Image (spheres, grey):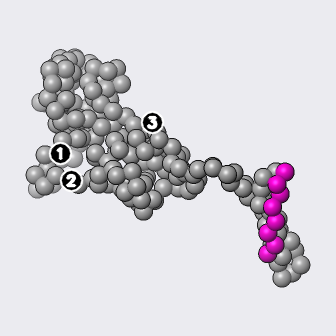
Amino acid sequence: MVADLDDVASEIVLVIHWVGGVHTELRLPKRRRGQRNATPDDIVEAERQLVLIANDDVIAGVLNRNGLTTGNGNRWTRERVTALRSYRRIPVFRPQIDWFEPWLNLGGAAKLLGVTLKTLRLAAEAGEIEGTHPLPEGPWIFSRSKLASPEARQILDRARQNPRHPIGSPPNQESLFPSIT
């Protein structure tokens, strides 16, 4: 293997000499003086919000699903999320022992309110209830205290009064799977 610098193109040129006599040339970009490979601030802020409801494995999956990479251009792994969290002093996600989580994802918040996921998501998108959505292909985050607000109760009442989409099944509806006992 032979390494050379191409200062005009600002690249590192690697020439690999194989046993059969074939040569392969690879060109890699050369870092410029003062160039940093830091993770962008918007990714760091998204991690600060996601750590409220998810562990490092889940955060790595969400970041990868959104096509985001580390400062060096790598895919996210649990170890890389942990390293960024440690470096930026972001606290670790710890589920509450009493299962009374102060922050909920969309599914947990909808279950708490007794509405469908779509109803709550549409209300959050319209700004009728406060929720954060740090990444386009990621979870919604709701504060339990905001879900107890009068605005949240209005959404619940409005959903229950909608005749086109009643909550629950009609009382005379038969089960799709009859009892075999």
**Percent x, y of residue 79:** 42, 62
The secondary element bearing badge 3 is classed as loop
Q: Rounded to the nearest whole Å, what is the CA distance between mark 2 and mark 3?
A: 24 Å
Q: Which numbered circle lies on residue 124?
A: none
Which residue is tagged 1?
Answer: 101
Rendered residue at 82%/78% (across/down): 18
Three-letter amino acid code at disc 2? Pro
Of the pair 58 and 169, the residue shown nearer to us = 58
Q: Earlier in the sequence, mark 1 or mark 3?
A: 1
Q: Can residue 160 be seen?
A: no
Which residue is tagged 2?
Answer: 95
Badge 1 vs badge 3, beta-carbon distance below 8 Å: no
Which residue is tagged 3?
Answer: 136
**62 on left or right of 173:** right
Three-letter amino acid code at disc 3? Pro
Q: Rounded to the nearest whole Å, what is the CA distance between mark 1 and mark 2?
A: 7 Å
Badge 1 vs badge 2, beta-carbon distance below 8 Å: yes
Three-letter amino acid code at disc 1? Glu
Mark 1 packing: few (<14 Cα in 10 Å), some, or many (20+)?
some
Residue lying at the far bottom of the rendered structure: 19
Q: What residue span does the magenta drawing correspond to?
A: 1-8
The secondary element bearing badge 1 is classed as loop
Q: Earlier in the sequence, mark 1 or mark 2?
A: 2
Q: Is residue 2 magenta?
A: yes
Rendered residue at 40%/55% (across/down): 87
Q: Rounded to the nearest whole Å, what is the CA distance between mark 1 and mark 3?
A: 23 Å
**18 on left or right of 47:** right
Q: Is residue 50 above or below residue 79?
A: above
